[in-house]
Each structure stands twice: as C-alpha cells, then as structure tokens.
Amino acid sequence: MTGPRTPGRRCCVRCAATGVKFATTWPEGSICRRCYQQATRRHGICPACLTQRLLPGRIGDANVCTDCAGIPKDFHCSRCGREDEPVRIGLCAHCALNDDLTVLLDDGTGQIAPALLPLHTALTEQRHARSATIWLITNPDATALLGDLARGTQPLEHSTFTSHPHPRKVAFLHELFIEHQLLGPMNLDIERFQTWLTAKLSFAPETDARIITQYARWVHLNRMHRLAETGMLTKGTILSARQSTTVALGFLAFLAGRDSTLAQCTQTDIDQWLADGPTTHSLSRGFVRWAIEHHHAPHVDFPYRVAKTEPILSQPQRLASIQLALDEHTDLTDADRAAAVLFLVFGQPLTRISRMTRDQIERRHNATILRVTDDEILVPSPFDNVLTQHLERLPHQNTTAHRGDPRWLFPGARPGQPINHNTLMTRLRDAGIEIRAAHNAALRALVLDIPAAIVANTLGYSYQITDKHRRNSGATFIDYINHRS
C-alpha cells in the first residue's frame, strides 16, 4: 500500500518519506533505504508465479518476485546462489558473514578455532544473517573478546566473561556461549545478583555489610539456587531480593541514626520505622525476622502488611480486555495476545506465563489442549485461534539466540531465555489492561463457574487462594440461597 505523495519533492513510493536517502529506483518508483532493506529480506511464495522466492517487488498490495515486478536486478549470490539481500558486491548476507567470522575466529593458523566452530555454524546458519553482522559491528567489546578466545589469549571459561572490564557489554555473548554449549550451564541472574551485592555493600559500614552478606547468602541466594534447579527462578525473584536487601540496609542505617544497633533494636524502633517511612519499609520484615531467629536481634514484633484494597475489574471491563486480546488489528503482537488470553481467561499469573514451555500447548484432533498442571484443558474457540497463531509465528526465531526447536512458549531476546514477565506486564499495561484488577477478576470469574478446588487443581493455585476469591465474590451467600431454595 503506497502512502500519499508529496508534490515537487522526491519521495519513497512505498512509505512516502521525503528528505531521506534512497537506495534504488524500481519500475514502481524511488525506494528509500529502509523500504529497500525490508523488501530484500522478504521471502515467500510469489502470488503471481507461485514460486518460492525473494519478494522485493509490488503489484498492488501483493509482494512479488523480481521477474513478476519487472525489477532489473538479480539478487542471487554469486557464491552460494541464494536469492537474498545483497551485502557486498555479488555476495549475500550469509556469505559476507561467513567471511567476516572466518577472519575473526581465526586461531592464528588460518583456520577457525575448533572450540568456536559451533558458534560459527550457529551464526552463519541463522535466518537473518545481517542481524549477526550488525551485532558484531555495534559490539566492539564482544568482537574483541571473540578474537582473544579464538587466538587463545583468553581462556574459554565463565570467569573470562564475569571478570571482563565491561561485563554487561559481553553478557549477551556469554549467554550465547552457554546456549550453544560452548560453556557449561550457569545461572547468570544469580551471578549478577552476587556482583550487585558486592558493589552495594562496598559503601556500607563493615558490621552492616557482614550481617547483610549473611542474610543475602542464607536467605536470598539459597532460595535462588533452589528455584533455579526447578526452572522457577524469575526476574521478579531477583528484583525482590535486591529491594529486600536495599531496605534492610536502610533499616540498619535508620538504627544507626538513632544511636542504636541491630542487637539493641526495640519495639519503639520498629514502630517508628514503619510509621515514618513509605510502605516499602515493610519489606524489611523478612530481614528482621531472620535476625531474631539467628539471635542477631532481640525479640520484637514486626507486623505483616496487608493490602487495604483489592482492585478488581467489573465483568464488562474484563470482557472488553478479552475482546482486545482477540482483535488482530491492535498494536498487540501475536505473543502479547496469547499471553493476554492465558492471563484474562485462564487466570495465569504473568510470572508463570512467561516461563511456560511449548509442550504445555498441544494441537490434537483439531483441538487445542492447555496443560498447566497434569490436567488437560480444552481451549474453546476463539481463544484457541489466538494461541495457534502465536505458535505459528514464535518471535526470536530468525537469529541464533535459541538453539534448535524452541523450548519456551514465549522466547525472549536473551539467548536460551524466556521473555521477562515485566516485559509482558508493560506491554499489556500499555494496551490498557489493569494487571492486578484483571487478574483478580479472572480468578473470581473462574471460581464462580467452576468449583474452587477444581480451579486450584487444574490451574495450579492453592486451595486457600481459590477459596478466598470464591468468598470475596459472594459465592458463599449464593450457595446458601440455592441450598435454601
């Protein structure tokens, strides 16, 4: 579909942009660089000649091959014969990337370092080779480290990455090495938390740093390792541990400001800490209770904070949000819409949705089956169409970030990792879905239609949670009326 023309100025025939750099002129008109790149990366079956080819041309709104569009250019690579976006004279993006990597990963003998061959293969065989080329150009720290690893001036081990002068700049490369088994498994989120903790405590008094180190090691790190073993460690756990540690440090500083210590803490100190500060002060409860249990602090009462309100959508609001998830013409991606269905219809928390695996959704006899626990749920229409479309168009499959068949239902941009649940939350919230209120509404709707115990068993909730939502929905009173009737 061409945009409106600007008379008197050269403009792109496809996007109507003016004042930009133009890549070429085809029979349809001038093509800007951005549209040229998009056109020369599009493959499929040409609707005019029904052949599988590169589809850079246009006939009306249809994308067609060069022959059908009358484009006087041959896009076949002079080396491999692949019809693709040209990067260098006569070479496609894959061959150009292969040349670059052959030089970069040279071990000094004119050959690619044997240990790095799996990485070379993964990068050169990914669908969008130009993405890897751009990544190498824009990440000089990663490129330099690859050269050092190839020549053997740096050892191929985790410490090479974690002790790098700029560890964040080589973090993606580190995850890529783990995903493609050039390095053994390692949870980088836990490693980053430990690095953050060391930096955080470097500014704290020695006694405070010592007690916080013990607390973080025995509480947070132990929990992280347990969750990592079962694949349940999420970004939320890491962020919660950071916030809890920061608030605990703030509590120790508060005591110091009152000329007191943790060992001298009184009930008055606790009451004042909670009364004067924001609600985040309540997050130090875990630290104080741990300190009491391990005899670092005297016995004091630290009350548990209970939310004063429980937001919930009305049924019309919930149905409007569900309709948004079903609409293919919104700004939501297929992944966003699938996540919204699992969230709004089946009441799954975003932390769980983000880590769902492909085998939890199965197409069987023209039906879509969802498994959260061992029970199978038949996904009704039209929700099954949303999930099926997502499975057919999984994101992040054009690069080497994910090895082999995708494991995750919602693959993330990080190698081998699922999408961050905060990313999902932000996307749904930006679309106008109120997260907490929508989740509460979904659970209440479920326990009104299905016995609370079955909801708990089928959708992975505790009996206490589903019973609470059933009571709050007024179902207990409704059951009483029905029984009387």
Image: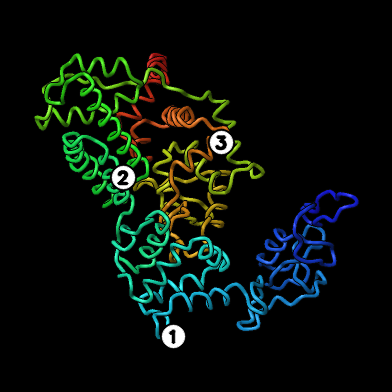
Residue wearing tag 2:
196
Left or right side of 115 for 249: left
In the foreground, 256 or 172:
256
Label placed on residue 110: 1
The CA span between labels 1 and 3 is 52 Å
Is 216 situated above or below 442? below
Query: Disc 2 or 3, which lies upstream in sequence?
Result: 2
User: Mark 2 belongs to which amino acid?
Assistant: Trp
Is 481 situated above or below 212? above
Is residue 358 among what the camera can see?
A: no
The CA span between labels 2 and 3 is 30 Å
Residue wearing tag 3:
430
Residue for point 32% across, 34% down: 243
User: Mark 3 belongs to which amino acid?
Assistant: Asp
Q: Secondary structure at mark 3?
A: helix
Left or right side of 380 for 374: left
Residues at marks 2 and 3 touching, judged by CB atoms closer than 8 Å: no
